[in-house]
Image (cartoon, coloured by chain):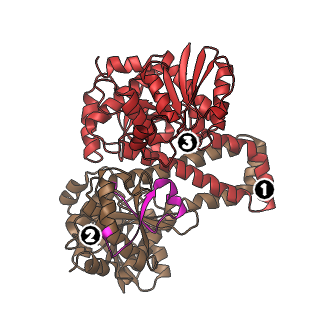
Chain colours: A red, B brown
Amino acid sequence: MIKIAVDLMGGDNAPDIVIEGVKQMLDKEPDVEILLFGDEKYAFQHERVTFQHCTEVITMEDEPVRSIRRKKDASMVRMAEAVKYGEADACVSAGNTGALMSAGLFIVGRLPGVERPALALTLPTIDDKGFILLDMGANADAKPEHLSQYAQMGSIYAKSIRKIANPTVGLLNIGTEDKKGNALTRETFKLLSEQDTINFTGNVESKTLLLSAADVVVTDGFTGNMVLKTLEGTATGIFKMLKQELTKNVKNKLAAGVLNKDLQNLKGKMDYAEYGGAVLFGLNGIVIKAHGSSDGRAFYNALRQAKDSVQEGVVEAMRKEVSHD
Amino acid sequence: MIKIAVDLMGGDNAPDIVIEGVKQMLDKEPDVEILLFGDEKYAFQHERVTFQHCTEVITMEDEPVRSIRRKKDASMVRMAEAVKYGEADACVSAGNTGALMSAGLFIVGRLPGVERPALALTLPTIDDKGFILLDMGANADAKPEHLSQYAQMGSIYAKSIRKIANPTVGLLNIGTEDKKGNALTRETFKLLSEQDTINFTGNVESKTLLLSAADVVVTDGFTGNMVLKTLEGTATGIFKMLKQELTKNVKNKLAAGVLNKDLQNLKGKMDYAEYGGAVLFGLNGIVIKAHGSSDGRAFYNALRQAKDSVQEGVVEAMRKEVSHD
């Protein structure tokens, strides 16, 4: 039986979408137990759900480190403690990302030898293969040695969860030539080239990210977050303009009606909800962040990712290969 | 009479698109003279064109600084010298960006007091207003003081060329809160807040860039280049997927036929060619980079931008306000 601790109160659409995702999970996966942390007024009966009443909630506006330290009875804090004390194998929240990273760092704790945990996200590509991008913002300022560990952790995850035998690793940069970039990327390039536990294939430009440039792409948290927001913003902007064009007169509306299903498909391809949640790599347990504006399906995908990570022994693999424990 | 020096040989589609752009310019602007630098076999007769034969060409693969220093008779080098020696008021090239930046720095030279020149680009927004983003990659590593000068130069350009009375300035960051970001953006935020010659409105997230978040957005060259390539890559990727959907069966092809003109319009909105070239700010003369894959119209737009910059006295304004000469 795999036990997953869940923050019922985190996220823009909590607790509804959390309950929906949890129920989907229970229906589809008979070998999963859920520990649900939140306000008891939302409790429901299920033989594989244990409800834990919490009196506090960490909001999207809360200051991450302070809220984790002060709100001792917050659903997110207690969920992380369940992992720390071995009551659960993994935890999932759609709440405040900064607070969840702090909970991971200060409650669940780092693996020995890991200098900085990193937030990793699986992103869509045009050919539906997808790729892992990290760090998405756990550490805005990073050193070359941190990026080198990100590459190791990303490779382990790609092997065990995405079942890619010898995953390619790229360094996100502003040119493909070896010496391109800023001080950080030039130094990191050297470290990655010397690392024999990964399959480093060189620099990757952001304009080729959607074209499956590499299975794992590493960058510092500032750049990773910037690129993610640019991807999201551009996609949203283009679909908005597209909608304007498609609805501007009767002729276009009729044509758009014919295309509707395929256009929805296209939008779905760019939809991060399909790809599960963001994973905090380098911790002494599985901590997964479901997208803040998740729907039930997205939350279910994040739960499934938690289950897979437990089953495949991701934390043990990282402990062995990265922290040389 | 405004004199513009032009590199006939630079860019993927040179010299054809350069000749096309120059001819458009001569037709539309009777008060412009062109000094054309390149292989004489492409020379053509026009009363306002002076042809200057050059025996060398800087290619897209050439190492920037070295090629500028060694290829003394390259069209790009001689074009920049024409500005240096006062024979031309401005220069335009669609060639190797790095080499053009080096030519600007080492041949045209910096304005006194300007620490780092910056590459600025006017980018589209959904409401067609557009905004200036800098630095797009002149300096991959930048300090807070550099970004502070970029903000001043961007404001001057927005006032004189884009005719915006009190242009808003935003700092590109991974969150809108004052203390968000990495060490560079946090320090820059403080400097910009204290600067009274600009209208600083705070942090801007990349996901709102297409929504006219600010008239001028400043960032370091690594991040600027990364964001630009992400914007281009995402737009190209989505239009590619859209085309796949629109041509996958007869029904869709018919509907797409009805929408064709409006979809082309939409693609045009995201087309950088419409927005002229990138300008090197902080030099002792006007240096403009036309997009490498320019067509004749894009090259014409870059030439017009050069003419406007001369007419509006952009260099003099920067000399006065930024370098306090």
Q: Is residue B167 left or right of residue B185?
A: right
Q: Quadrant of the N terminus of chain A?
A: top right
x%, y% of residue B60?
Answer: 34, 52
Residue A51 vertical placement versus A97 (above, below): above
Element at label 3: loop
Q: Mark 1, residues whose alpha carbon is within 10 Å: few (<14), some, or many (≥20)?
A: some
Marks 3 and 1, the one that precedes in the sequence? 1
Question: Is mark 3 in CB contact (under 8 Å) with mark 1?
Answer: no
Q: Is residue B208 magenta?
A: yes
Comparing A139 with A100, the one in front is A100
Comparing B201 with A240, the one in front is B201
x%, y% of residue B165?
Answer: 45, 80
Mark nearer the viewer, 2 or 1: 1
Using the rendered view, name the quadrant where residue B115 is placed: bottom left
Q: Which residue range is magenta in the image?
A: B194-221
Q: Which residue is mark 3?
A: A292
Mark nearer the viewer, 3 or 1: 3
Report the amino acid beneath label 2.
Answer: Ala
Q: Which residue is mark 1?
A: A253
Q: CA distance from mark 3 to mark 2?
A: 52 Å
Residue B10 vertical placement versus B168 (above, below): above
Residue at 30% x, 28% y is A114
Residue at 74% x, 42% y is A261
Residue A127 vertical placement versus B126 (above, below): above
Question: What chain does badge 3 belong to?
Answer: A
Question: Is mark 2 in CB contact (under 8 Å) with mark 1?
Answer: no
Number of the label disc, if any, that sits on residue B80: 2
Q: Is residue B33 magenta?
A: no
